[in-house]
């Protein structure tokens, strides 16, 4: 009888520890789900202040995503095209700037977006 009683107690302790672990694990995995989308209401254009050549881009609604300006530049010396993009992703209505290399001019402006 002593052997049976100790097995019942050990089995009960094992069941309690397993159930307790499952409750802790399930509580730890619950997180808020957020949906991210590409920015919207965006605007981009060539930007040439004081003889510099480049482009700007901005979006009024980031929707959880990010954006940056891109530009296609043309070298004055040989007509080669150079594609450049801003170094940092922006969000929340901030303006993104990108510049052409020296001795080139901006031909086309654009924008890159991502949903993160």
Image (tube, grey):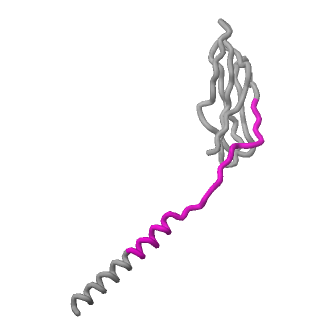
Q: Is residue 57 left or right of residue 26?
A: right
**Residue occupying the point 63% across, 24% down:** 84
Front position in the image: 39 or 55: 39
Where residue 113 sits in the image (x, y, percent)?
67, 38
Q: Is residue 50 above or below residue 23?
A: above
The range drawn in magenta is 18-44
32 within the magenta span: yes
- Residue extending furthest toward the bottom: 1
**Res. 103 image quadrant:** top right
Which residue is the extreme one toward the top? 77
Q: Is residue 66 magenta?
A: no
Residue 18 appears left or right of 60: left
Residue 49, picture quadrant = top right
**Nearer to me, 4 or 6:** 4
Residue sitting at x 66%, y 43%: 91
Q: Quadrant of the N terminus?
A: bottom left
Horizontal and vertical percent position of residue 42:
75, 38
Q: Position of residue 43 (x, y in %)?
A: 77, 35
Which residue is painted at 64% across and 40% down in the image?
Answer: 114
Q: Is residue 5 above or below residue 111?
A: below
Which of 109 and 38 lies nearest the eye of the viewer?
A: 38
61 with respect to 85 (left or right): right
Report the front residue among 10 and 85. Answer: 10
């Amino acid at each position: 009888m002593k052997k049976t009683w100790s097995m019942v107690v050990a089995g009960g302790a094992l069941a309690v520890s397993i159930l307790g672990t499952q409750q802790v694990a399930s509580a730890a995995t619950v997180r808020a789900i957020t949906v991210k989308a590409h920015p919207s209401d965006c605007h981009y254009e060539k930007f040439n202040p004081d003889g510099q050549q480049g482009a700007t881009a901005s979006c009024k609604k980031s929707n959880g995503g990010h954006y940056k300006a891109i530009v296609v530049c043309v070298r004055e010396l040989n007509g080669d095209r150079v594609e450049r993009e801003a170094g940092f992703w922006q969000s929340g209505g901030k303006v993104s700037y990108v510049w052409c290399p020296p001795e080139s001019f901006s031909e086309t402006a654009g924008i890159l977006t991502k949903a993160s």
